[in-house]
Amino acid sequence: MKLHNRFMFLFVYLFQYMSGFGNEFSSEDPRCPGSLPEGQNNPQVCPYGLYAEQLSGSAFTCPRSTNKRSWLYRILPSVKHKPFTPMPCGDLTENWDEVEPDPNQLRWLPFTILKSTEKKVDFVAGLHTICGAGNSKSRNGIGIHVFTCNTSMVDKCFNNSDGDLLIVPQQGDILITTEFGKMMVEPNEICVIQQGMRFSVDVFGETRGYILEVYGAHFELPDLGPIGANGLANPRDFLCPVAWFEDRTVPSGYTIINKYQGKLFACQQDFSPFNVVAWHGNYTPYKYNLKHFMAINCVAFDHADPSIFTVLTAKSTKPGVAIADFVIFPPRWGVADHTFRPPYYHRNCMSEFMGLIKGHYEAKEEGFQPGGGSLHSIMTPHGPDADCFQKNSTAELKPERVAEGTMAFMFESSFSMAVTKWGLETCQRLDKTYYQCWERLRSHFNPNWKPSKQ
């Protein structure tokens, strides 16, 4: 009975979280009370005979407000491994010159997930790069990927030395084991695994999602400006895992996969990397449930810019310009008077990649499907399709729920992104009829129009 009670306690403990964005956290596995050193980071001998190891997410000399680091107390240090050797990258790439540039509006049908009976594919093998720009060597750029997998990672973990990964599950829950603890992430939630953090992904069937990778910057909450102190994504709703360790030897070899300068490398060690008994710091993985987003909206007329829907931003060195923003379009009320309420026709100095987690996107109810995507490149015109324009030009402007049961998102970037060969050709999911959704737009120009007398 005592063993059963201990198991239940550990199971409940595993899926507890600490709340807050960028907080100074501390956590120790309850199986080893007192495992965090008191009063210093690096004692001569750590409690329980553990090794102290610091993981730095910023330069040592960064201002305190942007300094990111955590101290990990582990059974064996991460340096104990065999040499890294190159491994095949599959469809993961940082080569933005594979094909000629394409300024067209691009849309993809839902990306294919192989069945496990066809081929077993885990998270890393299921990574496919759609588009991106910049260079991980110069620490300035982004990559946009999709993951499609059907099996869990076994005695294998992933480490991205190039940047942060913002993961958006679309189909299927994912259980992410990290050096800091475990996180269960469901569709309509997101998680961020920051640069250098090792993690493994368990899945429970056919699984799909999107990833925004950012080189050289970390995600942060956008400034609120005139909105004031509260709104959008509130810091308290971000969740960080609690410490959990496994003291497990793997005589057959545990594989560490490292993404470094756009390439994959693998090394072997004979123990689990998830051997961190305790940790403290402000550089952690975290997750967020999109249902908690407090939407700000127009309550008079016209549109506010879509920046009011920004959840996280990775800032560039140019004030007000992001390397990448993560923007969502959640369920909300539409009440604007004298206004065409869906998104307006637009040409943008930013690149816009959109994905759909569930439901129907308001500006294109047909064709844009969950698990698919679209890319509107810098200065490429886009906007509502012909049906949406006609319907909303004549709609009665009463208060209505918008995007009920839907969650669309956008990865927006100041980079001019190139599409990969996989995205344009290999995946065979590019919708070559996309342009047709605007072909039925017709002129409503009336040279004899006169303003109505008020």
Image (cartoon, helix red, strand yellow):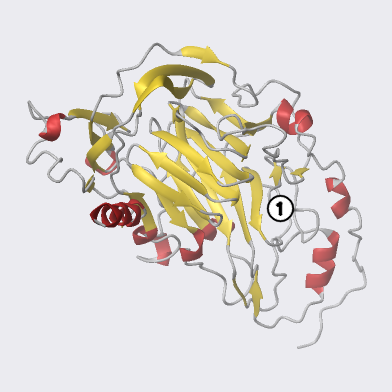
Relative vertical location of residue 230 with respect to residue 264 in this rendering, above or below: below
Residue furthest front in the image: 1
**Residue annotated with mark 1:** 346
- Identify the image quadrant of the N terminus: bottom left
- Identify the image quadrant of the C terminus: bottom right
Percent position (x, y) of residue 269? 37, 19
Describe the element under mark 1 as helix, strand or loop: loop
Relative vertical location of residue 189 with respect to residue 114 in this rendering, above or below: below
The residue closer to the viewer here, 379 or 237, is 237
The residue closer to the viewer here, 338 or 313, is 313
Q: In this view, does 156 lie to the left or right of 302?
A: left
Query: Which residue lies at the image location 38% right of the left edge and 55% below the top edge?
Result: 238
The residue closer to the viewer here, 162 or 102, is 162
Which kind of residue does numbered mark 1 sit on?
Answer: His
Q: Residue 216: name its quadrant.
A: top left
Residue furthest bottom in the image: 454
Relative vertical location of residue 442 with respect to residue 326 in this rendering, above or below: below
Q: In this view, does 261 lie to the left or right of 39?
A: right
Q: Can residue 388 be seen in this view?
A: yes
How many badges with numbers are in the image? 1
Q: Residue 231: name its quadrant.
A: bottom left
Percent position (x, y) of residue 334? 63, 74
Percent position (x, y) of residue 158? 46, 30
Query: Which residue lies at the image location 69% right of the left edge and 83% below the top edge?
Result: 398
Percent position (x, y) of residue 36? 15, 41
* Mark 1 crowd level (few <14, some 14–19, many ≥20, 10 Å Cα): few
Q: Is residue 275 left or right of residue 97?
A: left
Q: In this view, does 436 lie to the left or right of 131?
A: right
Query: Which residue lies at the image location 72% right of the left edge and 29% below the top edge?
Result: 422
Q: Can residue 322 be seen in this view?
A: no
